[in-house]
Image: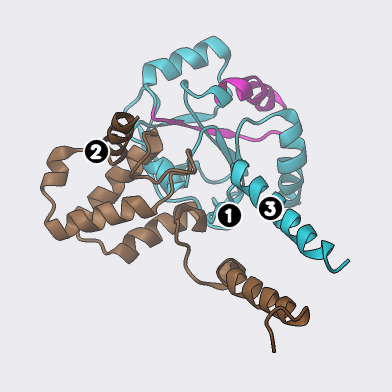
Chain colours: A brown, B cyan
């Protein structure tokens, strides 16, 4: 069992072209690794682009690598993906009008629960 | 009542979350609706002629992203051939052959019929990324200026076309 996990971990992060990856500075490598973990693979939705073997994920990794190499910033690359694939492509969607509910729902839920607990007198006085 | 309420809320939330967890989101809204098609330059299938986004404008048309390895494309092909032959609907279908080989694509078309006015070849899939494609087949409805009005993910069928595409096409032609 342990061995299986080890293998899974080892194959989980993939690099498309070793040579191209080697050409990156360590800062660029860090950025590349960070972005591919934060971008959702839309074909296999519970994996990131960094973990997935799907063709599209490979293409997106190549594209991200290319852009990192050309010196694009994190924001540039994310907005490149957002204009094409929409909010769904990022695991960490930006805070804006259409995602207010998504981000604020935990707080709202908390307030509701606190209010309810207070009403039934579970919070003491 | 007071005692049941939290249980009801819990079950409701549980069902909602469980459903969202196990139901993959298949129709992700495209941010490209209402925007012009991305610029591209692709060669025609088995040819050196390159076409750009400007070359395919001028008609209300469909852009169909397909490949010979794609199961859904196999399913929808019969309908595409039927649609292309339909004089009443009369809508050009532009094909983008995605991450495929020209020889395989040509064999597929000669064997099964060719519904496309033109097929562009995107072997590396760069244009497909610009179109926000994540799974073939995908079909875009564009107007004369190239603005995308609708995108369908998954195989087309007469039913899907009548319900989702026809009303928009009628509206655009008015």
In the displayed structure, would residue B155 be above or below residue B60? above
Q: Is residue A108 left or right of residue A87?
A: right
Label 2 close to label 1 by CB (< 8 Å): no
Q: Residue at 51%, 12% (x, y): give it.
A: B110
Residue tagged by mark 1?
B33
Label 3 close to label 1 by CB (< 8 Å): no
Span highlighted in magenta in the image = B73-99
**How far apart in space, not on screen, are marks 3 and 1 (Cα)?**
34 Å
Residue tagged by mark 2?
A16
Label 2 close to label 3 by CB (< 8 Å): no
Task: Estimate the x, y position of residue B3 in percent, counting from the top left.
Answer: 82, 65
**How far apart in space, not on screen, are marks 2 and 3 (Cα)?**
40 Å
Q: Is residue B141 visible?
A: no
* Residue A75 image-quadrant placement: bottom left
Task: Estimate the x, y position of residue B46 in percent, counting from the top left.
Answer: 36, 22
Spot the residue most to the front. Answer: A124
Q: Secondary structure at mark 2?
A: loop
Marks 3, 1: nearer the viewer:
3
Q: Is residue B83 magenta?
A: yes
Output the chain of dot 1. B
Foreground of the two, A9 or A48: A9
Foreground of the two, A1 or B129: A1
Residue tagged by mark 3?
B14
Mark 1 residue crowding within 10 angstroms, few (<14) / some (14–19) / many (20+): some
Marks 2, 1: nearer the viewer:
2
Q: Secondary structure at mark 1?
A: loop
């Amino acid at each position: 069992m342990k061995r299986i996990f080890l293998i899974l971990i080892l194959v989980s992060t993939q690099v498309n072209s070793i040579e191209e990856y080697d050409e990156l500075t360590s800062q660029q490598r860090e950025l590349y690794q960070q972005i591919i973990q934060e971008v959702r693979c839309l074909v296999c939705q519970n994996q990131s682009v960094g973990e997935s073997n799907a063709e599209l994920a490979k293409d997106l990794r190549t594209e991200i690598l290319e852009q990192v190499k050309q010196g694009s910033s994190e924001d540039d690359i994310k907005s490149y993906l957002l204009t094409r694939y929409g909010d769904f492509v990022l695991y960490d969607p930006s805070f804006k009008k259409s995602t207010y509910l998504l981000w604020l729902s935990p707080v709202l839920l908390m307030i509701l629960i606190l209010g309810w607990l207070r009403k039934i007198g579970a919070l003491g006085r | 009542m007071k005692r049941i309420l939290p249980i009801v809320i819990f079950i409701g939330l549980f069902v909602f979350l469980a459903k969202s967890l196990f139901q993959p989101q298949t129709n992700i809204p495209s941010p490209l609706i209402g925007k012009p098609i991305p610029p591209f330059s692709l060669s025609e299938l088995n040819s050196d002629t390159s076409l750009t986004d400007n070359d395919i404008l001028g008609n209300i048309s469909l852009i169909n992203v397909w490949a010979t390895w794609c199961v859904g494309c196999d399913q929808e092909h019969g309908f595409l051939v039927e649609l292309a032959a339909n004089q009443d609907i009369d809508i050009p279908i532009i094909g983008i052959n995605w991450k495929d080989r020209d020889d395989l694509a040509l064999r597929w078309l000669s064997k099964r019929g060719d519904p496309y006015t033109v097929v562009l070849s995107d072997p590396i899939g760069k244009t497909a990324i610009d179109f926000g494609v994540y799974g073939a087949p995908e079909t875009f409805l564009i107007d004369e200026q190239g603005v995308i009005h609708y995108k369908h993910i998954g195989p087309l069928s007469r039913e899907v076309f009548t319900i989702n595409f026809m009303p928009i096409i009628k509206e655009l032609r008015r």
